[in-house]
Image (cartoon, rainbow, N blue to C red):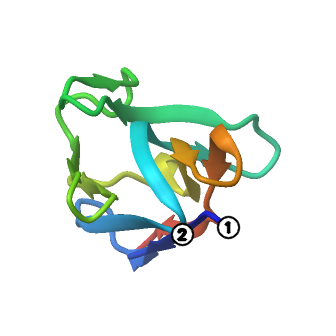
Amino acid sequence: QVQLVESGGGLVQPGGSLRLSCAASGSILSVNDMGWYRQAPGKERELVAAITKGGSTNYAESAKGRFTISRDNARNTVYLQMNSLKPEDTAAYYCNARIYSITAGWQDYWGQGTQVTVSS
């Protein structure tokens, strides 16, 4: 069974930084696109940043210039470095990955979410 486990959320002051991590584990044969989404209370889940297996990246306009997505293919892990955080970045952040496993073939998986709160 494939699992995505996130870590790194927390409370930070405006202007501060956080680094989120998400590690995929299980009977994994291949990991394709990986990404980070977020969902604030009362709002729909939205894409923050995504990265292909080859390292090509895509960012939401709100994340450009402040957030950096990266991945370690050997560890099946994706990271999100968030700098210059703003109160409007407050949300639950979810990791997503398209994974080929022995038992399920290609599937999209989600992490359990990690809370990021930006407040003074």
- Quickly name the residue at label 1: 1
Identify the residue at image location x=36%, y=74%. Answer: 12
Where disc 2 sits, the SS reads loop
Check the image and name the residue furthest to the right. 42
Foreground residue among 28 and 24: 28
Q: Earlier along the polypeptide chain: callout 1 or callout 2?
A: 1
Where disc 1 sits, the SS reads loop
Instruction: Please tell me the numbered disc located at residue 26.
Output: 2
Instruction: Please tell me the numbered disc located at residue 67.
Output: none
Amino acid on which disc 2 is placed: Gly
Identify the residue at image location x=59%, y=56%. Answer: 91
Q: Residues within 10 Å of mark 1 (few under 14, many from 20)?
A: few
Q: Left or right: where does residue 58 sit relative to residue 110?
A: left
Q: Left or right: where does residue 67 sit relative to residue 112?
A: left
Residue 32: give x, y in percent of width and height.
40, 34
Amino acid on which disc 1 is placed: Gln
Residue 98: give x, y in percent of width and height.
53, 38
